[in-house]
């Protein structure tokens, strides 16, 4: 789904699934991606996996970035990936960040999460990964 450098900008849905009400980090990442030339759709707080997947499909997103601080990351990431597959949208890259124990990261990768950014990741690290992974240098 990624475009050529002369094509349309990369599109990323940034979402806060579940009941977690802390969105400063998600907003910082969304702003950094915008500043790096990515078209960002921020879904806001308290989104269900179904709402996030619907937004990603409707917006023709290249990727979904989930911010999870609530401890429900295993359930939420898994459900988003399952729903994308059910909607024939498994080519949409899923990545995320938040308070996620190191031991859970390999399991999330096995579920299909492309990348997890833990606290301390820089915005340039995130934007660089998005461009590299989605086909931009």
Image (cartoon, grey):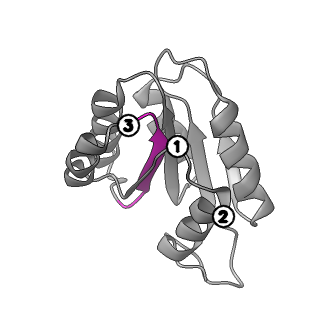
| 2 or 1: tag closer to the N-terminus | 1
Number of other residues with Cα within 10 Å of mark 2, as a class: few under 14, some 14 to 19, many 20 or more: few
Magenta part, dominant SS: strand
What distance separates the C-alpha of mark 2 from that of mark 3?
A: 20 Å
The location of residue 97, given as percent across then percent down, is 48, 43
Q: Residue furthest right?
A: 35
Secondary structure of the residue carrying tag 3 is loop
Q: Which residue is mark 1?
A: 119
Dot 2 and dot 3 residues touching (CB under 8 Å):
no
Q: Where 48 falls versus 120 (above or below)?
A: above
Q: Which residue is mark 2?
A: 124
Q: Residue at x 22, y 48 (%)?
A: 111
Q: Where 131 falls versus 61 (above or below)?
A: below
Q: Quadrant of the C terminus?
A: bottom right
Q: Residue at x 56, y 55 (%)?
A: 60
Q: Residue at x 28, y 28 (%)?
A: 75
Residue 100: numbered disc: 3
Number of other residues with Cα within 10 Å of mark 1, as a class: few under 14, some 14 to 19, many 20 or more: few
């Amino acid at each position: 789904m990624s475009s050529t450098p002369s094509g349309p900008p990369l599109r990323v849905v940034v979402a806060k699934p579940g009941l977690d009400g802390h969105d400063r980090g998600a907003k910082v990442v969304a702003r950094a991606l915008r500043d790096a030339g990515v078209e960002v759709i921020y879904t806001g707080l308290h989104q269900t996996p179904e709402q996030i997947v619907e937004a990603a499909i409707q917006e023709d997103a290249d990727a979904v970035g989930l911010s999870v601080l609530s401890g429900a990351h295993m359930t939420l990431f898994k459900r988003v990936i399952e729903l994308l597959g059910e909607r024939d949208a498994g080519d949409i890259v899923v990545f995320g960040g938040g308070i996620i124990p190191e031991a859970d990261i390999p399991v999330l990768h096995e579920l299909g999460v492309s990348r997890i950014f833990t606290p301390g990741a820089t915005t340039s690290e995130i934007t660089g990964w998005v461009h590299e992974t989605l086909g931009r240098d």
